[in-house]
Amino acid sequence: MSARLIDGKAIAADIRADLREQVQRLPVQPGLATVLVGTRPDSVTYVNMKHRACAEVGVRSVRVELPESVSEAELVGRVRELNTDPQVHGILVQLPLPPHIDEERVLAQVSLEKDVDGFHPVNIGRLAMKNRDPLFVPCTPLGCIELLRHSGTAIAGRQAVVLGRSNIVGLPVALLLLRENATVTVCHSRTRDIAAVVRQADILVAAIGKPEYVQADWLRPGVTVIDVGINQKPDASSARGYRLVGDVDFDACRRVAGQITPVPGGTGPMTIAMLLRNTVRAAQRQVQNG
Amino acid sequence: MSARLIDGKAIAADIRADLREQVQRLPVQPGLATVLVGTRPDSVTYVNMKHRACAEVGVRSVRVELPESVSEAELVGRVRELNTDPQVHGILVQLPLPPHIDEERVLAQVSLEKDVDGFHPVNIGRLAMKNRDPLFVPCTPLGCIELLRHSGTAIAGRQAVVLGRSNIVGLPVALLLLRENATVTVCHSRTRDIAAVVRQADILVAAIGKPEYVQADWLRPGVTVIDVGINQKPDASSARGYRLVGDVDFDACRRVAGQITPVPGGTGPMTIAMLLRNTVRAAQRQVQNG
Ligand SMILES: NC(=O)C1=CN([C@@H]2O[C@H](COP(=O)(O)OP(=O)(O)OC[C@H]3O[C@@H](n4cnc5c(N)ncnc54)[C@H](OP(=O)(O)O)[C@@H]3O)[C@@H](O)[C@H]2O)C=CC1
Ligand SMILES: NC(=O)C1=CN([C@@H]2O[C@H](COP(=O)(O)OP(=O)(O)OC[C@H]3O[C@@H](n4cnc5c(N)ncnc54)[C@H](OP(=O)(O)O)[C@@H]3O)[C@@H](O)[C@H]2O)C=CC1
């Protein structure tokens, strides 16, 4: 048996096509502002990808770039300017911020209505609470749920195991799965006998940042696997000297799983599609609310 | 074999004795304000218990009582007055609020420094996030952790199962257990085969509000059981016509569990002790910060 692939690249392309149409129907052009502090190569790459994706669906994008040495006050000042800029409907502060800046204080300054990354402390608090709806949900976790939906995997009443509890992936994924009425288990570096826990899963989300860590014999046959990991593995046959692999040993696990996302081409493209969707929805809301 | 009892009543009494001393050493008398809207009998009872407990440890308590029909604006106005009242160090808005009032908006008005109930959306958001520390943690969940500590139950690396995901008990308990490095599973009314999930638990926290629901044959021998449930069970032999039971079938489960909290006398007294502790700490902080 071989698992059915959950093709994040194709699903994300469909979502982008749909968003392109929605953008055309809007009376204003949606705008996304990215705020990048410093020049971390991975952050620069992510920001560039986001701008390219914006262009593709017709979202205007604005780039704010600040030196590594910027003061928190100055950064907050720039965020406040964006809050009042009518051409900017979504604001994304690229994380991580340099250590001299208090991340939570900065994120708390982003207007709730423009918090398309979903990391405003109030949006996170609402995500954790029953009967309170965050205006926006973090993009990678939202992309995981969307992949489950598109793959036809039932969530309610199923056992979901999440590997990882980071603020940007593991924990919000777990909160979203709980909202979808899964029975949710969260594992992390202190979990004992992780294989036995994973074996309970009908749905497994791996977000630990360890290349090919999840083994095939940990899986219950038929499980749906969402692999969030993006790791570099040395590979002499590649021009770059490495290739990208997930947190799951894909070649072995696909023989046991029922459905599985590839890396690359799984959760990665979905993250960006969800950012675009959040931005278009922010613009729609702001148009409606005048 | 019979489980060791975790005596919440005795542990809470020790904590109160310690707080009484701390209060005497403070240059100001700590003050707690309760805000009660309407006359729900259970809410009235809880508020009364809190005032009695304050008196016992030397905390001044102030009672704000508002009619069921109070407007949200008026309620918020009262909360703001308490925020600026130097004699009030902690503010507790008794929940639930009437349906015409937006609970989150009201809780968000409580000064973070005085949010001794821990329900400000920002405190909840911080509770959910790694490396962010809420100023205060909700009292019942905190009491559960404190009972585990006092019982000598190791948490890190153990499997914890939480039954219930309410905003006031289940979910914050799960987040706290995760912070303590347990591997945490959250169950709820949509969970299938709850017995099999419970059987994985080294630590079980039951907070579902169903009298004696958890059965002895669901338990792994030696498990530590924290029973948060407070339910009325008809009992002709009692003058009131009922007696209080937990969410766990105590008489049967104590034969399998390693340690267990009784109801009453388990989590109930701890909730109030934690409220007093939060209030005393709020006063200590406010004295320090001038
Ligand atoms: N597809 C996408 O768009 C995105 C992909 N990613 C990728 O997802 C992965 C995770 O990212 P992120 O959440 O930011 O990573 P973090 O490093 O912030 O968090 C990793 C989490 O995994 C846990 N963990 C580490 N080792 C183990 C182990 N051996 N067993 C169980 N748990 C373990 C850690 O536990 P503890 O808390 O105890 O330390 C931690 O909770 C990375 O590969 C990253 O590149 C990230 C963002 C977007
Ligand atoms: N000791 C103390 O100081 C306190 C005690 N309590 C007591 O704790 C208990 C829970 O209170 P609270 O959290 O406010 O209650 P809620 O009614 O708000 O929440 C109950 C939770 O239990 C879940 N649940 C209900 N039935 C089942 C079932 N058959 N199997 C699994 N899960 C189920 C619900 O699931 P779903 O989300 O799917 O509906 C929900 O998440 C009550 O008995 C209450 O009196 C409460 C506060 C303080």
Image (cartoon, coloured by chain):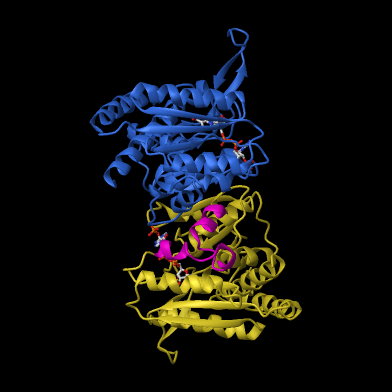
Chain colours: A yellow, B blue
Examine the residues drawn in magenta and state their main secondary structure: helix
Q: Position of residue A176 (x, y in %)?
A: 58, 56
Q: Position of residue B102 (x, y in %)?
A: 62, 45
Ligand 1 placement by image quarter: bottom left
Q: Residue at x 64, y 85 (%)?
A: A56
Outermost residue toward the bottom in this view? A239
A79 to B135, vertically: above or below: below
Q: Which of the 4 image quadrants contains residue A234?
A: bottom left
Q: Which of the 4 image quadrants contains residue A208?
A: bottom left
Q: Position of residue A79 (x, y in %)?
A: 48, 71
* Camera-nearest residue between A97 and B24: B24
Question: What quarter of the picture does the N terminus of chain B occupy?
Answer: top left
A280 to A118, vertically: above or below: below
What is the number of callouts on the image?
A: 0
Is residue A271 rendered to the left or right of residue B134?
A: right
Is residue A132 rendered to the left or right of residue B118?
A: right
Outermost residue toward the left in this view? B25
Magenta residues span A103-127
Q: Position of residue A262 (x, y in %)?
A: 57, 74
* Camera-nearest residue between B237 and B78: B78
Residue A267 visible in image = no
Q: Which of the 4 image quadrants contains residue A224?
A: bottom right
Residue A118 part of the magenta segment: yes
Residue A29 part of the magenta segment: no
B38 to A260, vertically: above or below: above
Residue A107 visible in image = yes
A8 to B257, vertically: above or below: below
Q: Residue at x 35, y 26 (%)?
A: B11
